[in-house]
């Protein structure tokens, strides 16, 4: 499978625990995005990377959220001290950005987080 | 806040009928994209229309863009049960160096 891969697909955690999600983008893609989607809503932008550089993180929901892409390949999204309100689907997408082309973003299947 | 707003929020039609969904947005854009999402799954890219284009076709899909009204429509012709899904429009915010992030609406839930 050469698409965007996210692990795990489902995560149930107790409130207050830390969780980490992984995203493996399409191999030649230079951009990687994280979105959060709650029930009945569209995806909400969180952050994105151009190669290993995190170009925007102001949309991360709080300082409990952090993301890394250490070698410009896979990325991790960590939520510390989880709260019930963090329950949502976390989506990763990647794209190949070339100067004169508008990128099509390819999404993974998402990680569904349930905080109990 | 979300840039795009889809209309209607929900649409139910019979197989073989056409389905039309609309999207309105607030600021100028580089392009507008439509995505489909089956329940509990990731999003699938359907079609991209650039700000200098007015209409685009892909199979049974037809997308129009009216930048003066800041609106777009997605038409699915001869719908099938497999078209049942949520449909989202996504706009990018223009910035130096090209588009950076997609901003999604709340979606239209289509039932065929």
Image (tube, coloured by chain):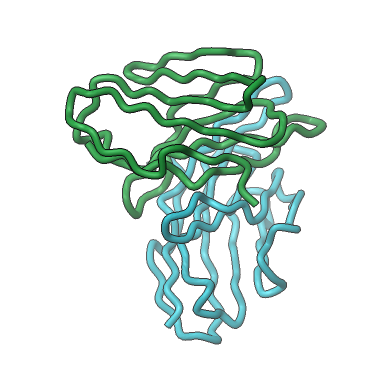
Residue A8 visible to an observer of this rendering: yes
Residue A104, horizontal then vertical, whole percent: 55, 31
Residue toward you, B74 or B99: B74
* Chain letter for the green part: B
User: In the figure, is residue B49 to the left or right of A53?
Assistant: left
Residue B50, horizontal then vertical, whole percent: 61, 20
**Who's the residue at 69% across and 48% down the image?**
A49
Q: How many marks?
A: 0
User: In the figure, is residue B51 to the left or right of A91?
Assistant: right
User: In the figure, is residue B58 to the left or right of A75?
Assistant: left
Residue toward you, A95 or B40: B40
Residue B11 figure quarter: top left
**Who's the residue at 56% across and 42% down the image?**
A94
Residue A2 visible to an observer of this rendering: no
* Chain letter for the cyan part: A
Quadrant of the image containing the C terminus of chain B: top left
Residue toward you, B7 or A102: B7
User: In the figure, is residue A58 to the left or right of A20?
Assistant: right
**Who's the residue at 18% across and 23% down the image?**
B16
Relative vertical location of residue A88 with respect to residue B92 in this rendering, above or below: below
Residue A95 figure quarter: top right
Residue A88, horizontal then vertical, whole percent: 47, 65
**Who's the residue at 47% across and 25% down the image?**
B73
Residue B95, horizontal then vertical, whole percent: 78, 34
């Amino acid at each position: 499978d050469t698409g965007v891969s996210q692990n795990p697909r489902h995560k149930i955690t107790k409130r207050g625990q830390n969780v980490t999600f992984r995203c493996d983008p399409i191999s030649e893609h230079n951009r990687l995005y994280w979105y959060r989607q709650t029930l009945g809503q569209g995806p909400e932008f969180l952050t994105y990377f151009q190669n290993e550089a995190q170009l925007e993180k102001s949309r991360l929901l709080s300082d409990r959220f952090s993301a890394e892409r250490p070698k410009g390949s896979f990325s991790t999204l960590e939520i510390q001290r989880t709260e019930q309100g963090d329950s949502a689907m976390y989506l990763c997408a990647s794209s190949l950005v070339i100067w004169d082309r508008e990128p099509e973003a390819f999404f993974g299947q998402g990680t569904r987080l349930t905080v109990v | 806040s979300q840039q795009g707003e889809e209309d209607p929020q929900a649409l139910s039609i019979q197989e073989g009928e056409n389905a039309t969904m609309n999207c309105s947005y607030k600021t100028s854009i580089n392009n507008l994209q439509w995505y489909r999402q089956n329940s509990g799954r990731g999003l699938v890219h359907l079609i991209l229309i650039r700000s200098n284009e007015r209409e685009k076709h892909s199979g049974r899909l037809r997308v129009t863009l009216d930048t003066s009204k800041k609106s777009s429509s997605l038409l699915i012709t001869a719908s099938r049960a497999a078209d049942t899904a949520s449909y989202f429009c996504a706009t990018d915010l223009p910035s130096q160096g090209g588009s950076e992030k997609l901003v999604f609406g709340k979606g239209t839930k289509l039932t065929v």
